Image (cartoon, grey):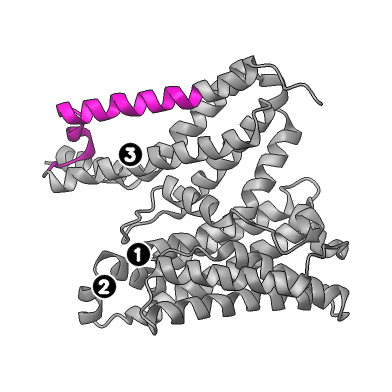
Amino acid sequence: MTSQSQSLTLRERAESYMSLIGPLAMIFAIIAVMAVVEPARYFRLSNFDIILKEAALYMPMAMAMTLVIVTRGIDLSIGSVAALTSIVMAYMVKSWGYPWWLAVSAAISFGALCGFINGMVITRLKVPDLIGTLAMDLVYRGLCLIAVKGIVLSRFPEEIVAIGRGDIPGFLPLPVVIGLVTLVAGYFIYTRTYLGRYAQAVGSNPEAAELAGVPVDSTRVRVYVLMGAMAGLAGVMLAGKLNAVQATSAPFFNLHVIAAVVVGGTSLFGGRGSMLGSLCGVLLLAMMINALVTLRIEFFWQSVASGVVIIMSVAFYTWLQRKDRDGESNWLGALGKPENIRMLRLFGVIVAVLIAIFGLGAVLPEPAAT
C-alpha cells in the first residue's frame, strides 16, 4: 500500500513537470547539433553571454504573458507598448532633463497604463482579446510614429545602458538578473497570491469562477496591467541594449514572447501555466536564433525555424491533454496507443527537419558579396 502511494506521488510529480519536457528536449537537441557542427564558435563564454542577454530581454514579458494566457487572454500590443514607453523615457531624459531613474519609472508606469487601457477595452467594451489588443497595437504604433517622426533617439545615460547590457563583475549580466527576478516574482504571484489563483480559475472556467465569487473582469484587467508594465520594462531594456530607440522598435516582441510561453507549456486554452516552462521557452528561442546566426543561416530561416518550433510545441501539448479526454490514468499509458505512436513518429520527422535546417547552415557556402 505504501509503495503504491509512493508510486502515485512520483507519477504526479512527473506529470507536474511535463511542460518542461518539450523545451528541454529541443534545447538538448540544439546543444547536440552545435557540438558536432560548430563547437568552437558556439560553446564560448562570450556567446553564452550573448544568449543570456538576448533571453533576458523577453523574461519580464514572458512572466506577464504567462498570466495573461492562463486567463485565456492574449496580448498582441506588447511590441508597440515597449516602443512607446521607451520613447517616453527617451524624451524625458534627453529633451526634458529628468533624471534617468524617474524616466525609467515613468516608462514602466506608462506601460501599465497601456495595459489598463487594453484591459478596459476587453472587459468593458467586450472586445475579444485578439481583436482588442491587435487594434491597440495599431494605436500605440501610430503614436510612436507621431512622437518621433522618423527620428532615432540615442545616447542615453550609462545607467540606462547598463539596464540593457551591463555586467555585474563576477556575476551574471544585469539584464539577466532583472529578468530572473521578474520570473521569480511571477512564480510567487502565480502560486502564492490571490491573483494567481484567480487567473487559473478564470482560465479554467470563467462562468464557474464568477459564480464562486471570483472577480473575473478585475482579474483580467490586473494581468493586463502587469503585462503592460513588463512591456514597459522590456522597452527600457531594449533602449539600453541598443543605446537607441525609434518608432519601429520591437516589431516582433508579441510573437516571440507568445511563442516562448506556449513552448514552455502554458495552455492557450487557459487554466494552466508554468513560469519555469516560460523560462525554458525563452532560453530555447534565444539558443535557437543564436545557433542559426552562428551557422550563418539567413535571417529569414530564423522565422521558419521559430514557426516550426511553435507548431511542434502546440501539437505536443495538445496531444498530452488528450489523455484526460481518453480516460488515461497517466501520460505514460497513452504512449502505447497506435495513433499516439504515429504522432510520435511525426514529431520525430519534424525534429529531423529542424535539425536539417541547422545542418544546411554549416554545409552551404556563404553568398558572395556584390
- Which dot marks residue 72? 1
- What crowding class fits label 1: few (fewer than 14 Cα within 10 Å), some (14-19), or many (20 or more)? many
| Magenta region, residue range | 327-355
Kindly indicate whether the residue at mark 1 contacts the one at mark 2 (C-beta within 8 angstroms).
Answer: yes
- Above/below status of 169 relative to 190: above
Residue 158, quarter of the rendered image: bottom right
Please give the name of the residue rendered at 18% of the width and 30% of the height, measured from the top-left corner.
339
- What crowding class fits label 2: few (fewer than 14 Cα within 10 Å), some (14-19), or many (20 or more)? many
Which mark sits nearer the N-terminus, 1 or 3?
1
Visible residue check, residue 49:
yes
Residue denoted by label 2: 206
Kindly indicate whether the residue at mark 2 contacts the one at mark 3 (C-beta within 8 angstroms).
Answer: no
- What crowding class fits label 3: few (fewer than 14 Cα within 10 Å), some (14-19), or many (20 or more)? some
Residue 84, quarter of the rendered image: bottom right
Residue denoted by label 3: 316
Visible residue check, residue 104:
no
Left or right: residue 171 versus residue 15 is: right
Amino acid type of the residue tagged 1 in the rendering: Arg
Q: Give residue 65's position: percent from left, percent from top.
A: 48, 61
Q: Give residue 77's position: percent from left, percent from top.
A: 54, 66
Residue 218, quarter of the rendered image: bottom left
Q: Is residue 296 magenta?
A: no
Q: Give residue 331's position: percent from left, percent from top.
A: 22, 38
